[in-house]
Image: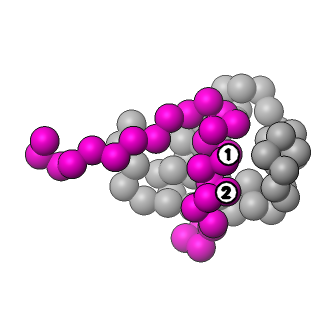
Amino acid sequence: MRIYSVEDLGREIRTERKRAGLTQQELAHACRVGVRFISDLENGKPTVEFARALLVTNVLSMDLSIDRRGA
């Protein structure tokens, strides 16, 4: 899946959280962040802290990569 916006990332995180059978509260606890952060992230809030977003993807066993366009 290509991610072009914060909204795209949030949507993928929500999908993976649900696939894992976790509530927002359970994921927040596993990541040691607040439920509000998980909610903001899943809703594509543009000011979420990137380091925490990476932590969430790691806890959900999601890999992120950067590819050069046209390569």
- x then y, percent, for residue 46: 55, 70
Q: Is residue 6 left or right of residue 2?
A: right
**Predominant secondary structure in magenta?**
loop
Disc 1: which residue: 56
For disc 2, the neighbor class at 10 Å (few under 14, some 14 to 19, many from 20) is some
Residues at marks 1 and 2 touching, judged by CB atoms closer than 8 Å: yes
Q: Residue at x 55, y 47 (%)?
A: 11
Compared with 7, 58 (above or below) is above
Q: Nearer the viewer, residue 68 or 9?
A: 68
Name the element at disc 2.
Answer: helix
Name the element at disc 1.
Answer: helix
Whether 44 is among the magenta residues is no
Residue kind at label 2, given as amino acid type: Arg
For disc 1, the neighbor class at 10 Å (few under 14, some 14 to 19, many from 20) is many
Residue 52 - label: 2
Q: Which region shows up in magenta?
A: 45-71
- x then y, percent, for residue 25: 87, 46
Which residue appears farthest toward the top when viewing the image?
20
Compared with 16, 54 (above or below) is below
Q: Is residue 61 left or right of residue 65?
A: right
Q: Residue at x 34, y 46 (%)?
A: 66
Q: Is residue 38 left or right of residue 68?
A: right
